[in-house]
Amino acid sequence: MKKKKVLGLLLTAALLAVNTVGCGSEAKEDAVAEEQTIEAAETPAAGESDKPEEFDLGATVYKSAESPSGYMVHFAYECDDEKVSTVSVSGPFLYLDPKVDVSEESNCYTPYEYQNGFYASNMAPGTFTWTYTEEMKLNQDTGYYEAEFPITSGSFAYNYVLKDEDGNETQIDDPANPSPAKDNTNSDIATGDLTHSIVYGSYDSDKQSDSLNMDYVQPVYSGAGTLTYVEYKGSLSDHQDLGVYLPNGYDENRAEPYKVIYLSHGGGGNETDWFAMGHVNNIMDNLGKDIIIVTMDNASYEWDFAKIEDNVLNNIIPYMESNYNVSKEASDRAFAGLSMGCMTTFHMYYDHPDMFRYFGGFSGPDLSAIKSNDKLKDATLYFTVGTCDIASNKVMQNEEGKQIKYEDYVEYLKTATEEKVIDGGYVYGSHDWFTWSQSFYNFVNEIAFK
């Protein structure tokens, strides 16, 4: 059995681990009063709601005429531990108004307060509130702890918070809906997302018409590609890990080899994150893109960028070329990453622009990577940041003085001469999967291999 280890969450997890009630106590109390009231715009007509008569364990999303978003999510958890005194559900269910500055303390809304045009986030910079948490109520009829509130389009990673009589808290994924990160049980590096389950909200073209439609992250149940986790001989061991997505209809004998996108996770993650939390396989299925996706285990290298680059170029790419029908042309390769993976992407871009045609850096450039390279003109770099992202100076200044913020690179580009760069700007979200899934979607749909 391989030894498992957990590395520190270098850029994200220290803040992501903070688990607080969203949007202030007054809003919370109003939102989850004993008798919750959400005024409907009109009396629901027949067929406008599909609330089940009974709820199964886990998370159930149903259409609701009474919900301000058009949909509700219901959570049900069975707890037989007598030491547990309270159970709460927690996740990125905060909402912000894009018309209001993110630094405004009032710009933080519960799911009940959602209005058309708002966007979901796991953080509200005005109050620096991370995640929305709601205590679940024990249903005496079912014996389940239950809660429900409005939900919008997209993927929401949630967990349950169990508190004992002494106030000690334990965070777990939903036993009825386990974390998809657990689909890979043989990784060298444990991701911090093992305690996060996934629930998919849906888009209502009326009540969410001015908000994001992120239904492209939802699973495709017919004509989906395949996702497997494999081991390869890397620079650290003979059993390093990759996630490999093959598009629907993959043909190992096809005359035209497949294009490939290589993806790096961020701090505290592993090769499962882009699939389990970012749903890039679902995105590719929904877009019908005939491209292979490869994710890797860069936390193994403690973010030594030179060692990561060496492993990608001399181990991962040769492995893929030996075992899959992938193109050996740089013009058919892309490399992208989030957070620490974004910094990795910047180093790869400036060091090896001849090995990939497209680069995508999301939430965290690293200006220490910049160097002169006459091959930069042959590659394209696309970069983004979230509207309330700690990788933005608008949200959090870097006290160490390092130039690792989105705005630092924007300023640098004013005098840059060699680079081919597309500024993707601010996308709705925080240092979270709303930002990263959107960024990947834009990258693969509008930038890569065009």
Image: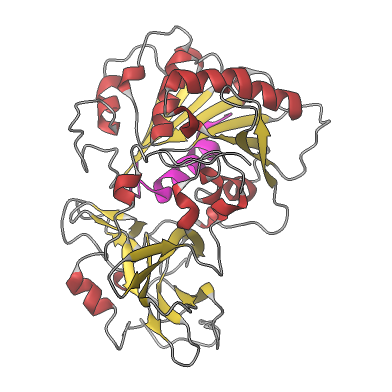
- List x then y, in percent, for residue 293: 61, 37
Could one spot residue 337 in this view of the protein? yes
- List x then y, in percent, for residue 121: 34, 55
Q: Residue at x 55, y 31 (%)?
A: 448
Pick the residue in front: 402 or 160: 160
Q: How is the image coloured?
A: secondary structure
Pick the residue in front: 432 or 445: 432
Q: Which quarter of the figure is the N terminus placed in?
A: top right
Image: 135 above or below 2: below
Main secondary structure of the magenta stretch: helix
- Specify the farthest residue to the bottom: 141
Pick the residue in front: 175 or 156: 175
Residue 70 is covered by the magenta coloring:
no
- On screen, residue 169 versus residue 254, left or right, reads left
Image: 37 above or below 341: below
Q: Which quarter of the figure is the C terminus placed in?
A: top right
Residue 444 is covered by the magenta coloring:
yes
Quarter occupied by residue 107: bottom left
Task: Write down the region rendered in magenta.
Answer: 426-450
Image: 288 above or below 420: below
- List x then y, in percent, for residue 432: 38, 48
- List x then y, in percent, for residue 187: 58, 41
Could one spot residue 115 in this view of the protein? no
Q: Residue at x 50, y 60 (%)?
A: 198
